[in-house]
């Protein structure tokens, strides 16, 4: 793993000399892996203990930010509500009553949905500007003088105009996402039909593991193929280009998407609760995992991958830098299968579609 990662960074550096077709983005020199202790701040400021504390603080802050900004914290509420729901002896064994029975019995499936939505949007905003702003201050302002220590693209910064636009667009999408979460929460609380199960031991350990892995793979594959579709030229130019405006992304870029794209991706995240028999806690875990790495992948901050299947933050940062390449998120598998991993022997740019890059013509 370490050797692979090292090779990756070496290839990143040599790629600069060989094939960077985008002149305005090409002057970045990525430092060797040995400089990585500075990811979370200057070692001059933090002692060893301080360093680990700052890592813990940043990780927690980002995880909370990621979980709350789209309203998914409400899933925790549903999870505990369902687990501690007082049992009713007259209730059928399957508590997830069907949609038809709700209609027949006039049980309002979306009762209190607006209340949940309002709470969700409110918390999203507080965390978006609170913790998101903190991340921005901690790295982009406080450590502006030494970007080579922590930044994926140390010479490239978003303009203030783009920073404002990504926050505006992110806020719009959070409002949409929070409202959607509120309705899903109401649906689940009011007994709407779902394939989630609420007790960890209900289906046994083997199924708990299999269903969790399957859901993770399904969501990652789904995100890859949706992303490939978003790079189909007409869709790219009209929709996905909104997100690619941020060539050196920040944490705020994560939700800076065309609302249709945001809904498409949020729609994908919700689908498992309707057709995969998965434990609610495991589903929440996968959602948090995806959002956490979504944030880190856009943060523009150099960060090692902890899990063997998870690419480091350069992987998606390079997607923003080179455009039509590295379409995956939490695994490189799909890019490897479709030969869309960035190659150091090719050039890339916003007009070079289809993920293969352009051949470099060697000088005579
Ligand atoms: Zn893209
Ligand atoms: Zn992105």
Image: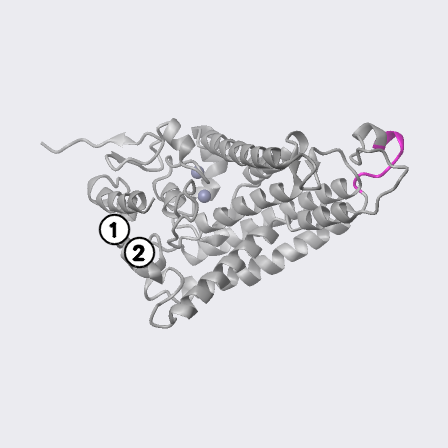
Range shown magenta: 102-110
Residue 255 in sight in this render: no
Q: Main secondary structure of the magenta part?
A: loop
**SS under mark 1:** loop
**Is 84 positioned to the left or the right of 255 in the image?**
right
Between 308 and 113, which is closer to the camera in this rendering?
308
Residue 27 in sight in this render: yes
Residue 64 % position (x, y): 57, 56
Residue 86 % position (x, y): 83, 47
**SS under mark 2:** loop
Q: Which residue is mark 1?
A: 27
Query: Would you say the residues marked 1 and 2 are in contact, meaning their CB atoms lie under 8 Å apart?
Result: yes
**Is 48 positioned to the left or the right of 66 in the image?**
left
**107 in magenta:** yes
At horizontal 25% and vertical 52% (from top left) the residue drawn is: 29
Label 1 – label 2 distance at C-alpha: 7 Å
Which residue of the protein is positioned furthest toward the left in this rendering? 364
At horizontal 25% and vertical 37% (from top left) the residue drawn is: 344
Between 225 and 168, which is closer to the camera in this rendering?
225
The answer to whether residue 61 is above or below residue 184 is below
Badge 1 or badge 2: first in the primary sequence = 1
Q: Which residue is mark 2?
A: 155
């Amino acid at each position: 793993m370490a050797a692979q990662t090292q090779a990756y960074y070496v290839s990143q550096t040599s790629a600069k000399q060989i094939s960077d077709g985008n002149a305005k983005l090409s002057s970045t020199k990525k430092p060797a892996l040995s400089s990585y202790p500075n990811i979370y701040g200057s070692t001059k400021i933090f002692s060893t203990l301080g360093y680990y504390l700052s890592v813990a603080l940043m990780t927690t802050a980002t995880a909370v930010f990621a979980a709350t900004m789209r309203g998914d914290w409400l899933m925790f509420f549903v999870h505990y509500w369902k687990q501690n729901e007082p049992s009713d002896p007259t209730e059928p064994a399957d508590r997830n009553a069907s949609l038809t029975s709700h209609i027949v019995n006039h049980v309002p499936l979306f009762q209190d949905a607006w209340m949940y939505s309002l709470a969700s949007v409110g918390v999203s905003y507080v965390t978006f500007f609170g913790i998101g702003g903190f991340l921005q201050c901690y790295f982009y302002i406080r450590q502006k003088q030494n970007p080579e220590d922590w930044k994926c693209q140390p010479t490239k910064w978003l303009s203030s105009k783009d920073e404002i636009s990504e926050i505006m667009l992110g806020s719009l999408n959070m409002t949409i996402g929070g409202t959607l979460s509120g309705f899903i929460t109401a649906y689940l609380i009011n007994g709407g039909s779902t394939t989630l199960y609420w007790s960890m031991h209900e289906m046994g350990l083997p199924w708990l593991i299999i269903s969790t892995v399957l859901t993770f793979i399904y969501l990652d594959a789904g995100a890859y193929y949706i992303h490939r579709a978003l790079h189909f030229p007409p869709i790219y130019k009209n929709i996905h280009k909104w997100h690619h405006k941020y060539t050196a992304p920040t944490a705020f870029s994560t939700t800076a998407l065309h609302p249709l794209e945001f809904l498409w991706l949020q729609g994908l995240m919700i689908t498992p609760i309707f057709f995969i028999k998965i434990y609610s806690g495991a589903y929440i875990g996968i959602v948090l995992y995806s959002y956490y790495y979504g944030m880190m992948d856009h943060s523009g901050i150099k960060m090692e991958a902890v899990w063997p299947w998870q690419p480091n933050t350069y992987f998606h940062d390079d997607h923003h830098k080179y455009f039509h390449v590295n379409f995956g998120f939490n695994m490189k598998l799909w890019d490897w299968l479709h030969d869309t991993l960035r190659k150091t022997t090719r050039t890339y740019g916003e007009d070079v579609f289809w993920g293969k890059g352009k051949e470099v013509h060697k000088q005579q």
